Amino acid sequence: MIIKKIFSLATSIISLFIFILFINSNSISDENNIKYYSNDEGILSLMYHRFNEHKYPSTNIQMNIFKEQMEIIQNSNYTFSNPKQFEENFEIPKINKEILITIDDSFQSFYLEAWPYLKKNKIPFILFVSTEPVGKKGYMTWSQIKEIEDEEFVTIGHHSHTHRYLVDESDDYFVKDIEKANQIFFNKLGFIPTLFSYPFGEYSKFMRNYIAENFEFAFGQHSGVIDINKDKFELPRFPINENYGDLKRFKSIINSYPLEYEQLLPLEKKLTKKNNPPEFKVKFFKEQKNIEKISCYSNEKNKWKKSNINISNQILTINFRGLFDPRRGRINCSLNDNGKWRWFGVQFSVKEN
């Protein structure tokens, strides 16, 4: 009887120990946003700025082209992602791909040109607002922003206060900028947005960690498709504009899929003399097939060329040709996975020497 009780107690202790290990491992997994190979069809996020402002081709899209792009999505097997359900559904692998529309900077041309079309068709989107320019020439007013926010298919996002190159400022300046915007959002709208977009898509490790402590999700400007394993505070978006918005390219973009990975290094996306070029490494899930077919391109010395890659045990490394020039360093990798084009990109902010 005593031996039986001792055995029962030992079994209970072992079970408790295993449970604690399980909880801890899940906590670490959640903290690092590492789940499992999910075969997620993904959420593909598109980023727009100006509409029918032909003087700014790098941030503008013509409305006739924009309408055609939306019709292409509507006529496909994809659905528009509702930002209000983004957090709720983020960790659920998508059976069918979703398209998330995002608009940065709240330019007046968006309100005059694109908003009537989106409202008529009830196409959901996120409008990322920088608080300092609101009401100035070329930008929306707070009354216009509130009008848009009243619609259930619209979500207002946080885009800082000044929209400066915050990655070049001190950490203290960055924090004060965000806090200033928070105050204005609360005073004008009655709430502080929980979705964030980095100005120019640039951020440091400090900025990313601060945003992670104060927001639910954050978006950059590096290309790729969102899956459940992507860092919640470094989410990719495809920029769409006159230079890179023709319909052939657009169809190619929306037909791309996530390339899932366990880990991507370095964590620091701000490059200085000390870490330029970076030690770049991506660890893929063992379930991801055809990794040997992956192809990467990078823009060291401000020239796009095929990267010198090495793949061993599902780990990809790049031997860079030289330094990344200021202002941005980029890497784009794609994989033809049995007819499905999988894609991810990385953007570094490169400091002037």
Image (cartoon, grey):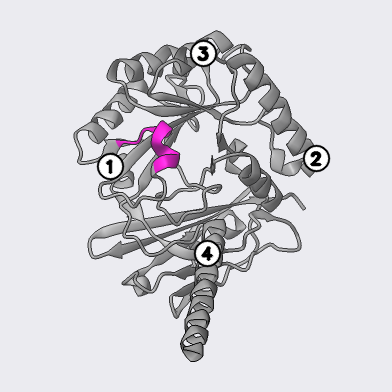
- In the displayed image of the protein, which residue is found farthest to the front? 1
- Looking at marks 3 and 2 on the same chain, the residue that comes earlier in the sequence is marked by 3
> Looking at the image, which is closer to me, 344 or 249?
344
Which residue bears the numbered disc 4?
A: 23
Q: Secondary structure at mark 4?
A: helix
The local crowd at label 3, few if under 14, some if 14 to 19, many if 20 or more residues have their Cα within 10 Å, is few
Of the numbered discs 1 and 4, the one sitting upstream in the chain is 4
Q: Residue at x 54, y 74 (%)?
A: 17
What residue sits 41% from the left and 28% below the top? Answer: 125
Q: Which residues are magenta?
A: 80-88
| Mark before the other along the chain sequence, 4 or 2 | 4
* CA distance separating discs 1 and 2: 42 Å
Q: Residue at x 53, y 67 (%)?
A: 25
Task: Report x, y in % for residue 272.
Answer: 73, 57
Magenta residue check for 85 = yes
In three-dimensional space, the C-alpha distance between marks 3 and 2, rounded to whole angstroms, equals 30 Å
Residue at (51, 13) in percent of width and height: 146
**What is the three-letter code of the residue carrying label 1?**
Lys
- Answer with left or right where residue 83 lies relative to residue 233: left
What type is the residue that disc 4 sits on?
Answer: Ile
Specify the amino acid type for callout 2. Answer: Asp
Residue ranking furthest to the top: 143
Eye-nearest disc, 3 or 4? 4
Q: Work out whether residue 86 or residue 116 is closer to the camera in this orientation and state it.
A: 86
Give the main secondary structure, helix, strand or loop, of the magenta stretch: helix
The residue pinned by badge 1 equals 251
